[in-house]
């Protein structure tokens, strides 16, 4: 996404700084709004919505929508515990991602190990750990501790009640999935989060700063759902 | 890179599976082959151990064969074949990455030619896959073994720079950067309009793509005046680079700094671009702090380049603690056994930067000594890498400008032995710097002189003084001159034994005036002292040296004032000898030239030197009043007295003092003497 102006850039003070529209509202260009919305769909991976929105509003995407689909398939595969499939797809998308990110690579292999343990495939799990994970630990001792912790799962009769039970939780899959998702977004030079939530945070922060430093009235937005501003003799700030 | 051979668990079992897979890659029908290929790809990506196992089983050959077979009929690829091509490219790329023997196998397999062909494909998926694989190969540790890309390949890569898919364009930019770094193909790239395309790509909104563009820009403008100037004339590019030098993570900033440094330090840079050096320095120093120990080899090089020839900036760098940072970084590199090219390059950069900062700054030199940097520097003089040796030598040269350093640390670290061996270094530049360093080392500290003499240093210097390289002749004669400065007779004899008289005469007649000047000062230092010091010089070949001095001072010589000054001092030293020595001068044409020197309006130093000759010739000698008297008379007849009297109001106070003393000498004991 291109330059969305920073609201903070507006200097406090003179009345006409708030814009020059007589009705007290400032026009935010429709195209900009649409791009914000599109950015949200794309980053969050709502590919069908993005496609439909592109058709209806004519908003172009800077990203190939197919890659979003791939990204979502990959994310879901990890969430389902099918890490091998996810890795195959990532390598299809861009083989450099797993090549260069040894930490991510380790975490995915670790997740594969966790899934084997979950399926009670003890022998396979041991072999897998030795063949795939031990050499990684050998090259990067920082991974050894995590590896040991994972293997500790095998030591318990019922790993789901063990002190390392967190490894078997949904949270763990979620973590791996979003680490992979971020890496893909990074490789495609996309932001890791949509712009909209950040813009809202920025707006709220700016309003608080204004309240702290000045008594000058300004059109304050309290209801983010409707975007209504408090009545004021002044005009509405624009996100420009 | 770490150890090449990784630890492979369950070796025989894993190996057997790899062997089977390679067999399948060779024999199966295309669809099944494709499945195996994908499996192999997924096994090796990110996993050095697996790569190692598969490379050993011959997987690289098998995969590159698949690629070659698939491309026999490139116009018509079905879906399976297309996938085979993409996956084999990805697999070959992965084999090149992180494992030296993998990269080697890929290069040997000849796959580069097929990958290059793919760059021209009309299927963008194939182009991207090939470009990615090539980038991994060009960034691998064996990249130096690649042959230069053909013109056609470079042309294809440049076409990729304007792709709508900017990520692939960026991959191409990274490959082109390597073509410049490894094979020096910047001008070739430029001839296809590469620079313009790169500058356009720099305007991309994708940071990664901008990074790749900067890699390429930095490589293209490195040591290339023409391209650096071309970039500096593009305001849009310069302003983007400036913006990138201030924002983003350190590695992005560093890339931008490399580009700006290249364009702002080239000799013909426009003034406003040259000024960017001042602006950039604090950014680079901050990067130095941030990237310290990150082992990024470029930071110290950028710093060194930025500071080169700029004393004010060097001082700012010192004040910003740069010497401390660099020296501790250097010490941290000590004792690492295996060093790859990158580690060498890093060391070279750190040493160069330290050398440049301490070139004119005594505080900086002191810091290096106090931080105990000297042992590492001296150790690096013996490094096997040309660049490291040259940089260490530069560092030693800067440090040798400090007497304190010579007397303590450099002496203790036994710098003389490695430095002397650098006098016969295969690299001309190292030889030049080493001989310059030696000039400083032998200047005044007797134990150092002794060591160098004992280690055969003069023999080495004498040999260098015969070099066809005039800089080497200059530095070596200079060092010999310094060695002879206020030396005693024994030392002089030992030096002349090595240098030999015929060689001294040859140097006095050298084609380079600068070398001649040094040779004249050797004579000047040789005849400084007692009668016994003068005798061998004037005796050699019936006064050959005197004839040369006569010629140098003669009206038709065209000698510079500098050369004349040293020659006159040599004459003046000879005149401090015995009556015989004085009369040798009295009887030569030199005397007339001395008178001319007194009349020289340009150089007051020359007038002072000439006055000294008169002072020495008329020096009071109780034993032989008569000789003094006859010299006084002759000098007066020649017009010396009149000339000296006309100089009593000389504009230079120095000259005035000497003239007064000379007049006193010339008139002493005579009727006129009482008048002065």
Image (cartoon, rainbow, N blue to C red):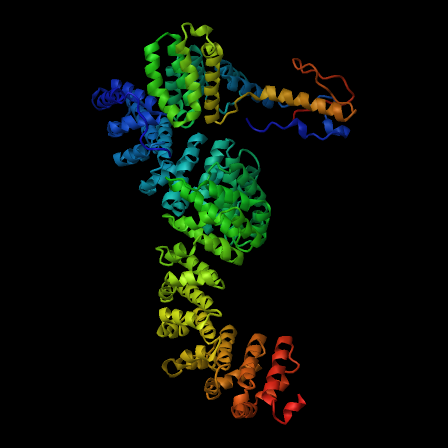
Quarter location, residue B117:
top left
* Tally of marks: 0
For this view, does B638 lie left or right of residue A15?
left
- Quarter of the image for the C terminus of chain B: give it: bottom right
Does residue A233 appear in this view? yes
Quarter location, residue A134:
top left
**Most extreme residue toward the bottom, as rendered?**
B671
Does residue A66 appear in this view? no
Whole-percent x, y for residue B114 in the image: 29, 33
Whole-percent x, y for residue B549 in the image: 45, 79
**Most extreme residue toward the front, as rendered?**
B623
Whole-percent x, y for residue B389 in the image: 40, 51
- Quarter of the image for the N terminus of chain B: give it: top left
User: Against B346, is B447 above or below?
Assistant: below
Quarter location, residue B124:
top left
- The front one of B20 and B176 is B20
For this view, does A152 lie left or right of residue B58?
right
For this view, does A235 lie left or right of residue B482?
right
User: Against B14, is B386 above or below?
Assistant: below
Q: Which residue is at a point 36% across and 35% down the rendered structure image? A: B140
Whole-percent x, y for residue B9 in the image: 30, 22
- The front one of A11 and B78 is A11
Q: Which residue is at a point 45% across and 66% down the rendered structure image? A: B483
- The front one of B214 and B375 is B375
């Amino acid at each position: 996404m291109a330059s969305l102006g920073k609201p903070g850039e507006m200097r406090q003070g003179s009345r006409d700084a708030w814009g020059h529209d007589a009705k007290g509202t400032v026009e935010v260009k429709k195209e900009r709004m649409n791009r914000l919305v599109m950015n949200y769909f794309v980053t969050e991976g709502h590919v069908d919505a993005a496609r439909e929105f592109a058709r209806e509003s004519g908003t172009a995407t800077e990203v190939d929508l197919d890659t979003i689909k791939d990204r979502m398939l990959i994310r879901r595969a990890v969430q389902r515990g099918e890490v091998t499939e996810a890795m195959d797809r990532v390598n299809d998308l861009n083989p450099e991602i797993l090549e260069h990110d040894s930490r991510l690579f380790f975490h995915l292999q670790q997740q594969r190990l966790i899934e084997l343990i979950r399926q009670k495939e003890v022998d396979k799990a041991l072999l897998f750990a030795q063949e795939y994970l031990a050499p990684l630990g050998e090259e990067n001792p920082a991974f050894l501790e995590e590896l040991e912790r994972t293997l500790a799962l095998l030591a318990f009769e019922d790993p789901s009640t063990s002190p390392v039970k967190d490894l078997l939780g949904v949270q763990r899959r979620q973590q791996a999935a979003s680490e992979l998702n971020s890496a893909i977004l990074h490789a495609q030079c996309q932001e890791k989060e949509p712009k909209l939530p950040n813009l809202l945070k920025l707006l709220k922060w700016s309003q608080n700063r204004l309240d702290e430093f000045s008594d000058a009235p300004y059109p304050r937005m309290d209801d983010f759902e409707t975007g209504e501003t408090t009545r004021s003799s002044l005009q509405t700030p624009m996100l420009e | 890179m770490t150890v090449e051979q990784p630890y492979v668990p369950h070796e025989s079992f894993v190996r057997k599976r790899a062997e089977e897979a390679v067999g399948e890659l060779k024999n199966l029908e295309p669809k099944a082959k494709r499945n195996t290929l994908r499996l192999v790809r997924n096994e090796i990506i990110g996993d050095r151990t697996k790569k190692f196992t598969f490379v050993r089983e011959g997987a690289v050959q098998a995969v590159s064969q698949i690629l070659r077979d698939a491309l026999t009929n490139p116009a018509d690829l079905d879906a399976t074949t297309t996938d085979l091509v993409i996956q084999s490219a990805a697999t070959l790329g992965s084999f090149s990455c992180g494992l030296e023997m993998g990269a080697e196998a890929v290069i040997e397999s000849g796959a580069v030619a097929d990958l290059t062909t793919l760059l021209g494909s009309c299927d963008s998926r194939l182009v991207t896959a090939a470009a990615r694989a090539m980038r991994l190969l060009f960034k691998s540790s064996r990249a130096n073994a690649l042959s230069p890309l053909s013109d056609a390949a470079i042309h294809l890569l440049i076409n990729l720079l304007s792709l709508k898919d900017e990520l692939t364009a960026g991959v191409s930019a990274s490959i082109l950067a390597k073509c410049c770094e490894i094979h020096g193909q910047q001008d070739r790239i430029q001839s296809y309009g590469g620079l313009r395309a790169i500058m356009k790509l720099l305007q991309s909104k994708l940071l990664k793509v901008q990074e790749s563009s900067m890699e390429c820009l930095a490589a293209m403008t490195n040591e290339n005046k023409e391209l650096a100037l071309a970039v500096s004339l593009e305001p849009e590019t310069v302003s983007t680079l400036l913006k990138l030098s201030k924002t983003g993570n350190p590695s992005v900033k560093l890339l931008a700094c490399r580009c700006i440094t290249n364009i702002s330090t080239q000799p013909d840079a426009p003034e406003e671009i040259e000024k960017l050096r001042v602006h950039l320095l604090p950014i680079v120093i901050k990067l130095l702090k941030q990237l310290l120990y990150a082992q990024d080899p470029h930071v110290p090089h950028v710093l060194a380049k930025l500071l080169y020839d700029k004393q004010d900036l060097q001082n700012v760098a010192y004040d910003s603690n740069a010497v401390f940072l660099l020296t501790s970084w250097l010490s941290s590199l000590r004792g690492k056994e295996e060093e790859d090219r990158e580690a060498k390059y890093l060391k070279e950069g750190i040493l160069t930067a330290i050398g440049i900062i301490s070139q004119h700054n005594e505080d900086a030199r002191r810091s290096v000594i106090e931080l105990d940097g000297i042992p590492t520097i001296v150790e690096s003089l013996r490094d096997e890498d040309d660049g490291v040796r040259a940089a260490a030598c530069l560092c030693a040269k800067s440090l040798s400008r400090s007497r304190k350093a010579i007397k303590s640390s450099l002496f203790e670290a036994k710098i003389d032995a490695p430095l002397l061996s650098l006098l016969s270094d295969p690299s001309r530049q190292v030889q030049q710097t080493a001989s310059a360093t030696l000039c400083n080392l032998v200047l005044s500290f007797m134990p150092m002189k002794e060591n160098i003499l004992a280690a055969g240093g003069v023999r080495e210097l004498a040999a260098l003084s015969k070099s066809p390289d005039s800089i080497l002749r200059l530095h070596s004669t200079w060092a010999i001159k310094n060695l002879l400065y206020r030396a005693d007779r024994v030392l002089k004899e030992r030096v002349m034994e090595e240098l030999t008289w015929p060689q001294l005469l040859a140097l006095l007649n050298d084609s380079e005036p600068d070398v001649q000047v040094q040779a004249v000062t050797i004579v000047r230092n040789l005849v400084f002292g007692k009668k016994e010091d003068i005798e061998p010089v004037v005796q050699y070949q019936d006064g050959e040296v005197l004839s040369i001095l006569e010629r140098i001072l003669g009206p038709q010589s065209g000698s510079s004032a500098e050369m004349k000054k040293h020659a006159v001092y040599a004459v003046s030293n000879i005149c401090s000898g015995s009556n015989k020595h004085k009369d040798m001068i009295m009887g030569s044409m030199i005397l007339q030239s001395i008178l001319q020197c007194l009349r020289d309006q340009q150089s007051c130093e020359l007038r002072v030197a000439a006055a000294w000759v008169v002072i020495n010739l008329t020096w009071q000698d109780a034993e032989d009043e008569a000789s003094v008297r006859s010299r006084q008379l002759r000098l007066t007849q020649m017009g010396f007295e009149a000339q000296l009297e006309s100089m009593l109001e000389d504009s230079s106070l120095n000259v005035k003092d000497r003239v007064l003393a000379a007049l006193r000498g010339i008139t002493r004991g005579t009727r006129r003497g009482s008048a002065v």
